[in-house]
Image (cartoon, rainbow, N blue to C red):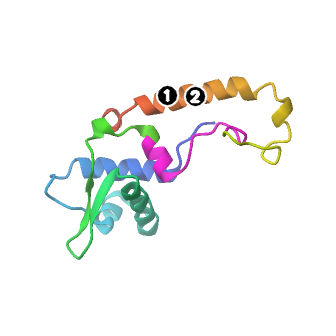
Amino acid sequence: MIKLSKSVEYALFAIKYLNYIPSDKLVSTKELSESMNIPYDLLAKIMQKLVKTEIVSSVQGTKGGYFLSKSPKQINLNEIIKAVDSEIRLTDCMFENATEDDCKRLNDCSLRSPLSNIQNKIIQLFTSTTLEEII
């Protein structure tokens, strides 16, 4: 089953919140955490990842906080997933340099190629889906 992780879900909630804040206002992790009922420590890690990938920006200091770096039209769902979690994979062997340690059937699997095609279609869908469509 394909399921977005809680971290991705929380990232989407945080980005949605930031999107509706006036552009001249910064939002702290505490404010985000309290307003959306997200565990503070987890949200702080998520926000750091979003800053690292330049989806959001931060200002340090007592009056610091976060703001969106880009318009929701310029951010796609796949970027968020990759920033917060990792690549989308339907199975453990669905990455470029998979070995038999990842799957004993790797060299004799009749499902890997068709599942790879499905995975590519999912990635295309997530890449073409902007945050504007979600939020």
Which quadrant of the figure has residue 94? top right
Which label number is shown at residue 120?
Answer: 2
The crowding category of the residue bearing disc 1, from other C-alpha atoms within 10 Å (few below 14, some 14 to 19, many at least 20), is few
Q: Identify which residue is drawn at 52% across, 43% down.
A: 4
The extreme front residue here reads 97
Most common SS among magenta residues:
loop
The reply to whether dot 1 and dot 2 touch (C-beta < 8 Å) is: yes
Q: Identify which residue is drawn at 48% across, 45% down.
A: 81
Q: Is residue 108 magenta?
A: no
Q: Dot 1 lies on which element? A: helix
Q: Position of residue 95 (x, y in %)?
A: 66, 40
- Taking 75 as reference, is 23 above or below it? below
Please name the amino acid that badge 1 sits on: Gln
Q: Nearer the viewer, residue 134 or 116?
A: 116
Q: Position of residue 9 (x, y in %)?
A: 45, 48
Q: Nearer the viewer, residue 72 or 101?
A: 101
Q: Which residue is mark 1?
A: 124
Quarter of the rendering occupied by the N terminus: top right
The crowding category of the residue bearing disc 2, from other C-alpha atoms within 10 Å (few below 14, some 14 to 19, many at least 20), is some
Q: Is residue 84 magenta?
A: yes
Answer yes or no: is residue 112 visible: yes
Span highlighted in magenta in the image: 79-94
Please name the amino acid that badge 2 sits on: Asn
Q: Position of residue 77 (x, y in %)?
A: 42, 39
Q: Dot 2 lies on which element? A: helix
